[in-house]
Amino acid sequence: MTISIVVPTFERLDHLRPALESVFAQTWLDWDLIVADDGSGEDVQTYLRTLEARPRVKVVRLAHTGNPAAVRNAGLRAATGTHVAFLDSDDLWAPRKLERQIATLGDRRWGYTAFRRVDRAGQVLPEERTRPWTPHAGDIFRQVVTGAASIRTPSVIATRELLGEAGGFDETLRSCEDYDLWMRLALRAPAAVVDEPLVDVRLHDRNLSRDWASAFHGRDRALAKLESLVPAPLRAFVRRERARNGAGLVSEHARRGERAAVARALLAGAPHAWRYPEWWWRALRALTRR
């Protein structure tokens, strides 16, 4: 069983080095590494050339797109393993991450692990001590859609076959492309979970979106697309979650005092959300907020 590890990157050499060292430190030895570079400069290219001298390492060089889904898909197309694992270039794996996941997968076609959030220096954030995390295994489609199943890209492993069936990452989405794919995986196959934080997800100023609303808009597009993919009994559930997401966008604009944006969000959400009382309740609160 060979695992192809896909690492997309653009610049940030200071984080790329330790991320890849966490790959080389894996106790599971049957892997190959694919670094998909989104047009980085000479410093990163020099480092990547040293990696290419190693066995089992391939570099896919791209013209810069700024599209994370496209870069991940380029790496995915180069994958040859039975399974694919994803690692972002500023995150880290524990040495036994792949070994523990393979042992837990059994006959399941995809899975994920718990994770920790760390700061730029790699120190665990204080709030991680109290952050709730509940492992969800098996048929977790509903939990993925609602966000009850908390999944980060570097925690996921899946068979290459399943990723092909699901269609990979949607390159039309500039945010929530990972959430979009996990929903499609969960729709097709039960998940395995390792209830152990084997991934460190780094939070810093270069990976926190300045456009906070893009997460709501990306999620809305993913849910709108999903509605046409799910069996009829699940469509009402997906529509309700889309309405809840729209209500959250309205509330956040209102909290920020962005009244024109509140009006735009209400107009955009009304055609698909008007059936749901929660949307009306939040709309009323947003309109009466001062």
Image: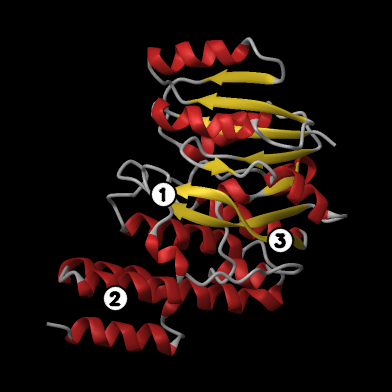
Front residue of 240 and 95: 95
- Are the two marked residues, 2 and 3, in contact with CB atoms closer than 8 angstroms? no
Label 1: which secondary element: loop
Residue 282, given in percent of the width and then of the height, sits at 32, 84
Q: If you read the primary sequence from the N terminus, does the residue marked by circle 2 or circle 3 appear first? A: 3
In this rendering, which labeled residue sits more in front, label 1 or label 2?
1
Quadrant of the frame with the C terminus? bottom left
The Cα atoms of the two marked residues, 2 and 3, are separated by: 33 Å
Residue located at (67% from left, 68% from top)? 141
Residue located at (72% from left, 70% from top)? 231
Residue on which disc 2 sits: 251
Residue located at (52% from left, 34% from top)? 19
What's the mark number on residue 123? 1
The Cα atoms of the two marked residues, 1 and 2, are separated by: 33 Å
Front residue of 229 and 110: 110
The vertical placement of 23 against 271, above or below, is above
The Cα atoms of the two marked residues, 1 and 3, are separated by: 24 Å
Residue 81, given in percent of the width and then of the height, sits at 78, 32
Amino acid under disc 3: Val
Front residue of 198 and 267: 198
Q: If you read the primary sequence from the N terminus, does the residue marked by circle 1 or circle 2 appear first? A: 1
The vertical placement of 198 against 265, above or below, is above
